[in-house]
Image (cartoon, coloured by chain):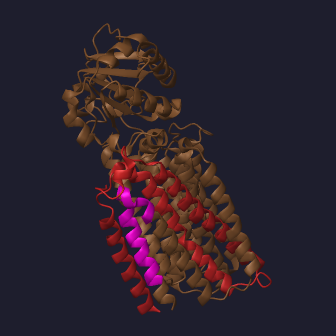
Amino acid sequence: MLAAAYIIASTLFIISIKLLSKQNYARLGNGLSALAMLIAMVATMMQYTVLNYELVFTAIGLGFLVGLGVARLVKMTAMPQTVGLLNGSGGLASLLVAVAESTRVSASADFQQVVIALTILIGGVTFAGSIVAFLKLARLMPSRPIVAPLHRVINGCLLIASITALLAIEYYPAYQVILLSAGIALILILGISAVMTIGGADMPVVISLLNSYSGIAACLAGFILSNNMIIVGGALVGASGFVLTMIMCKSMNRSLATVLFGAKRVVHQEASTSKKPVAFTPKAINPVDAYYRLEAARTVMIVPGYGMAVAQAQHALSELGDILESNGAEVYFAIHPVAGRMPGHMNVLLAEAGIPYDKFVEPDTANPLMPNIDVCVIVGANDVVNPAARDRKDTPIYGMPIIDADKANTVLIIKRSLATGFAGVDNDLFYKDNTIFLFGDAKMMLTDVILEFRDQLPGA
Amino acid sequence: MDANIALLLFIFVLTLFLGFELISKIPSRLHTPLMSATNAISGIILIGALYLCSQVDVMDNWLTASLVFIALFLAAFNVFGGYIVTDRILKMFKHSQHDKAKNKKGG
């Protein structure tokens, strides 16, 4: 009976993940996944009689209410930190199940002791790491990398010390509470220290990796309890999160190891053959000029980046897109996979602003279109449009797949200043002859351009 | 016990490979909902906490019981929050001709 329910639930989980990768069936997939979860819960409660229903229903009810509240009220711009928070709570739940089991079973087998230690390890790193990611994404702490001297050595020591403490429980059962607490404390410090060193633009990798970890933590807890349903669910999440992590790494041309262990990237600024002219004056224009350029354009490619999210400019961008379309232009939104702070961040924001998803194009589709684009508007993106990724072998971003904005006839960059992007590499795009700048806050500048359209073309 | 562990490891390895295969081709615009939905699946640990509730009584062991209580709360938050927020995100994605698009080419 329980086995049958678990098989049905596992099948539904697998189908749901498959459906989640298809636009038209993604909502159905999410629903099926929720149904699978419900089946697994009900079947478990029918098989194992809960001794204290008040406790169970209070806890689940509270979790439901908080989950509902957060999921309903959170702003789309706050989605990266929300996902971080959800990852963290999953990781902590797995850790607590492992701890509860180790306090309950006094003399457990070797295998179980090792798995309990591993669950605490991964669950603890997931939890502490997610909390730091949450704080960084919510801007409650600086998002730049904070690197302690010798942090790799320190992290390695923390890991070894924590495992030692957790595994020592088997040999010194009298000190169980102390060893357990010490092991957990050390692993939490490791989680904090590991994510501290990671900068804002690397967050898409970290968020997807923590997603993977939360699955692995659950999976390990499934081994402690010999529950195949938890193992299947956890392993699916672990694997899918890992694939996503690899996609993110590939999209930013970094290996997982460099994101995790090496926050400092060696940037040889002086050696780099930047195409910066000796006396460079950016071609700055005002919103009226921008209006004339855009009004004349037949094809417009818009490239959003994290700066758009910060300026909350997605609604203004959507409005501009509508105006350009009613003016007869073809409008596309080129979205780089790592633009923003989590996988798919830009898509979520633009969808929220009401832009239909068939206007979104990935770099592979956007790049062949570029030579025919009249104006490419760049809003808050930097490294992902830097041609140095194609041309300059000595830059850290060399080889990273980019959006070839420089191949458009005119490049209009809406930006506050000429500062470099996260990678710290001078953007060669700035010095191209066909590049013009609209300096200022993205939302304000877009609004000004929209107002100009309204004045000049009341019909549009 | 050993045969059982071997069986669980067998399931684990196969599921990992299945998971790798399942999402090889996913449009990047669906990355966020995929992540938040799979995130909710990792709340499956909820049933582990439920199982512990059948083994532990609050009266017998308050420490274990309170650990399990917090675990249940967090897992439920993970599950419900994850699914609801994913649905909210997916509801926002619209095709320019949304009526027609329903059953036509996906992905």
In this rendering, would B21 be left or right of A45? Answer: left
Q: Residue at the spot x=59%, y=64% of the render? A: B80
Of residues A362 and B107, which is closer to you in this image? B107
Residue furthest out toward the front: A459
Position of residue A152 measured from the top left corner of the image (x, y, whole percent)? 46, 50
Q: Which residues are magenta?
A: A6-29
Q: Residue at the spot x=53%, y=32% of the render? A: A312
Is residue A349 placed above or below B6 in the rendered structure? above
Of residues B93 and A154, which is closer to you in this image? B93
Is residue A368 placed above or below A82 in the rendered structure? above
Main SS category, magenta section? helix
Position of residue B8 measured from the top left corner of the image (x, y, whole percent)? 42, 83
Position of residue A451 measured from the top left corner of the image (x, y, whole percent)? 48, 17
Is residue B32 placed above or below A293 in the rendered structure? below
Quadrant of the drawing holding the C terminus of chain A: top left
User: Where is residue A251, by image quadrant?
Assistant: top left
User: Where is residue A239, by image quadrant?
Assistant: bottom left
Specify the colour of chain B: red
Q: Residue at the spot x=49%, y=85% of the render? A: A5
Position of residue A140 measured from the top left corner of the image (x, y, whole percent)? 63, 40
Q: Residue at the spot x=36%, y=56% of the render? A: B102
Is residue A218 in sight in this rendering? yes
Say if the magenta span includes residue A15. Answer: yes
Is residue A256 in sight in this rendering? no
Of residues A291 and A399, which is closer to you in this image? A291
Of residues A18 and A185, which is closer to you in this image? A18
Specify the colour of chain A: brown
